[in-house]
Image: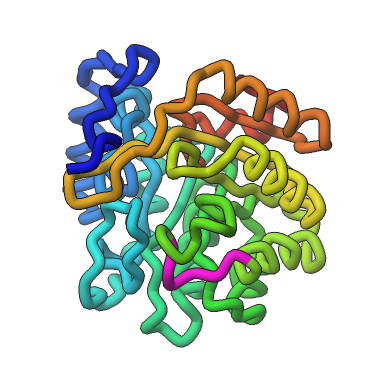
Amino acid sequence: MKREEYLRKPEWLRNTIKPNQSYNEVNDILIKYNLNTVCKAARCPNRKECYNSCTATFMLMGRNCTRNCAFCNVTSAPPQPLDFKEPENIAKAVKELGIKHAVITSVTRDDLEDGGAEHFSQTIKHIKKINPDTTVEVLIPDFQGDIHSLRTVIDARPDIINHNVETIPRLYPIFRPQAIFQRSLELIKRVKILSDIPSKTGFMVGLGEKEEEIYELLRTLRQAQCDMVTIGQYLRPSLKHPAVKEYVHPDVFKRYYEYAIKIGFEYVVSSPLARSSYMAHKGLKTRYML
């Protein structure tokens, strides 16, 4: 076993939040409508906090992903049939939970001709129909670079379009072998070319990147006119996943935050437990957040 696999989790990553009554209510509603969340599938460290606040990030199109990113805990297996009641059921769950900023993501569905874009579109439309005061943020896959799929999502008018680059380009062959950095970057560019919708992305640190590579990535994302960015610590979901190379100190996250602001990002979250959808509602209300 390599030395890095013995890295102990530092104090700043220890989460002592306990479930409350709202946590159980969220679980009950998810079961009631047969819904999935990335909070559970990806073993998000903030799940208790979000569920306790009566919110969750809904995950469309089943539990199985057609890709197999090394860092991810979502199951890679043959995909499940689409549930065409899912968009409406998510809208109903949003209403029952009183969610004012709904975040919707999905597994990657390379088996579908449009990558699931129409399913995203229907979900956005149902949420806005049943919950006219709720804003909607979507965290979409790359749709294999298909511009028509991206247009389908844009035409449904979500309030934020997010697509995570996840890591620096150099580490893509190791951690995202079925993805292409330039393809993800082009999607972010196209959001701004095709619409006035704010664009957002997120990535992890602690995978073996160098600090200068993070600054270079931030510059590249700003050149693509990306408006918002989240930066968080990679946490190993299980012993089957790659080991953490480094637990990045909060002071380094602060440097990334300050640099991202300096080069023009409109909204920045940079901290060890930051995730794309964590406290996402603040992206529409607060310019900067640490």
Query: Farthest residue toward the bottom?
Result: 113
Q: Residue at coordinates 49% horizontally, 53% vertically from top-left?
A: 127
Q: Along the line of sight, which residue is nearer the eye, 178 or 43?
A: 178
Visual colour scheme: rainbow
Residue 288, horizontal then vertical, whole percent:
70, 24
Q: Is residue 39 left or right of residue 202?
A: left
Residue 64, horizontal then vertical, whole percent:
25, 66
Q: Is residue 223 above or below residue 53?
A: below
| Region in magenta | 176-181
Q: Residue at coordinates 26% horizontally, 23% vertically from top-left?
A: 8
Q: Main secondary structure of the magenta part?
A: loop
Residue 267, horizontal then vertical, whole percent:
70, 33
Q: Quadrant of the N terminus?
A: top left
Q: Is residue 254 left or right of residue 246?
A: right
Q: Residue at coordinates 41% horizontally, 52% vertically from top-left?
A: 91
Q: Is residue 175 left or right of residue 189?
A: left
Q: Quadrant of residue 77?
A: bottom left
Q: Along the line of sight, which residue is nearer the eye, 255 or 33?
A: 255
Q: Along the line of sight, which residue is nearer the eye, 168 or 46?
A: 168
Specify whether residue 64 is in view: yes
Q: Along the line of sight, which residue is nearer the eye, 62 or 125?
A: 62
Residue 277, horizontal then vertical, whole percent:
48, 40
Specify whether residue 128 is in view: no
Magenta segment: does it hold 1?
A: no
Q: Is residue 80 left or right of residue 274?
A: left
Q: Residue at coordinates 76% horizontally, 35% vertically from top-left?
A: 266
Q: Quadrant of the C terminus?
A: top right
Q: Quadrant of residue 3?
A: top left
Q: Is residue 221 above or below residue 271?
A: below
Q: How many marks?
A: 0
